[in-house]
């Protein structure tokens, strides 16, 4: 499990450091950066499919209309999420993007209630109320609704909801999603080149190299994450996920010198308190279920006791 923990830490740390990378494209339109990210991500996953011998599985999924429809919706959602994130970073809203990923787990809870009719415990309702109060306070402090944070949270939460119904693995699913988006992305890049508006091959070799690398930078943490979730209890993954927005917040305030007022601190504090309540309740619930299933005479008792010790 130790290896899985390190892989999870690496994945969330890379995601947390993403603002530094995307800031390198300041001055390039976010839509163009997105098109390059999609295009080179597709190139990266296609190369991986060939190397791992999974081309046939991908081809079979691509011929299934139901699969294509499901992953097409997922592709649209993650495409919007990537666009908002790149735009937010280069528009000077790294702090607000971090808020979006702090509240994403709570958006997931609300989607579970609305879509799957899941029931929340008392602590979970308290967490949702705290987070709602925090966002409301930030709305007053900003003088406007934090649309960027909410947009990131809703699109990523909805993306996760869509993937919940998916049947492919994380890597094969990403391959199908980028396959859905790569056509429009390449067409847009071709239009920019023909209209002499492309930043590619015009700004400089370093920028060109970074744009090409954006696909591989996108794939690397996903592969680490896919490996981690197979080796680490989900309760631990749930705690690790807060590393990324925490790093983003620190980068936004200390590196990019974005303002962080006392009003923002109060609003963020409410969200952080909600996440603490939510995380503690999740760990307790996981342990209670594991202990209940480990009673003598019940199937899987040994495995459940082992899972509790790992948590």
Image (cartoon, rainbow, N blue to C red):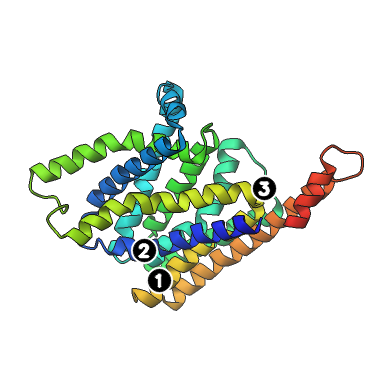
> Quadrant of residue 186 in the image?
top left
Residue under label 1, please give it: 251
Give the position of the N terminus as an image quadrant.
bottom right
Of residues 86 and 15, which is closer to you in this image? 15
Give residue 19's mark.
Answer: 2
Q: CA distance from mark 2 to mark 1?
A: 8 Å
Q: Quadrant of residue 76?
A: top left
Asked whether the residues under the numbered discs 2 and 1 touch, taking CB atoms below 8 Å apart as contact, a structural biologist would say yes
Is 209 positioned to the left or the right of 255 in the image?
left
Q: Do the numbered discs 2 and 3 sit on residues whose CB atoms are within 8 Å?
A: no
Which residue carries the number 3 mark?
120
Front position in the image: 298 or 99: 298
Please rate how many residues cluster around mark 1, counting C-alpha atoms within 10 Å: few if below 14, some from 14 to 19, many from 20.
many
Q: Nearer the viewer, residue 170 or 275?
A: 170
Q: Position of residue 239 (x, y in %)?
A: 61, 59
Secondary structure of residue under mark 1? helix
In this rendering, the answer to whether 5 lies above or below 222 is below
Question: Measured from the top left, where is residue 9 in percent x and y?
Answer: 54, 61
- Picture residue at 55% right of the left edge, 53% below the top: 105
Q: Secondary structure at mark 2?
A: helix
Residue 10 lies, in percent from the top left, at 51, 60
Q: Residues within 10 Å of mark 3 (few under 14, many from 20)?
A: some
Residue at position x 34%, y 49% from top?
215
Q: Secondary structure at mark 3?
A: loop
> Which circle, 3 or 1, is nearer the viewer?
1
**Within-10-Å neighbours for mark 2: few <14, some 14–19, many 20+:** many
Q: Position of residue 74 (x, y in %)?
A: 42, 38
For the C terminus, which image quadrant? bottom right
Mark closer to the observer (2, 3): 2
């Amino acid at each position: 499990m130790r290896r899985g923990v390190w892989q999870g830490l690496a994945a969330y740390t890379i995601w947390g450091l993403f603002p530094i990378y995307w800031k390198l494209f300041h001055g390039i339109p976010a839509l163009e950066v997105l098109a390059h990210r999609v295009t080179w991500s597709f190139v990266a996953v296609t190369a991986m499919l060939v190397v791992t011998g999974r081309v046939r599985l991908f081809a079979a999924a691509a011929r299934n209309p139901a699969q294509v429809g499901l992953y097409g919706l997922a592709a649209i959602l993650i495409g919007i999420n990537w666009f908002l994130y790149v735009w937010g970073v280069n528009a000077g809203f790294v702090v607000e993007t971090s808020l979006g990923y702090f509240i994403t787990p709570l958006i997931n809870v609300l989607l579970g209630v609305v879509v799957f009719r899941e029931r929340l415990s008392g602590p979970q309702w308290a967490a949702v109320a705290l987070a709602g109060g925090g966002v409301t306070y930030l709305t007053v402090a900003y003088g406007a609704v934090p649309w960027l944070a909410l947009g990131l949270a809703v699109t990523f939460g909805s993306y996760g909801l869509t993937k919940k119904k998916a049947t492919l693995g994380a890597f094969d699913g990403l391959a199908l999603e980028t396959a859905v988006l790569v056509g429009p992305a390449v067409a847009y890049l071709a239009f920019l080149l023909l209209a002499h508006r492309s930043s590619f091959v015009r700004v400089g070799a370093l920028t060109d190299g970074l744009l090409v690398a954006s696909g591989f930078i996108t794939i690397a943490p996903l592969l680490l994450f896919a490996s981690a979730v197979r080796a680490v209890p989900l309760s631990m993954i749930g705690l690790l996920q807060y590393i990324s927005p925490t790093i983003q917040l620190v980068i936004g305030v200390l590196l990019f010198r974005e303002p962080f007022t006392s009003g923002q601190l109060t609003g963020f504090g409410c969200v952080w308190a909600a996440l603490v309540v939510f995380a503690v309740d999740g760990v307790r619930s996981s342990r209670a279920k594991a202990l209940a299933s480990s009673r003598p005479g019940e199937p899987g008792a040994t495995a459940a006791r082992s899972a509790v010790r790992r948590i």
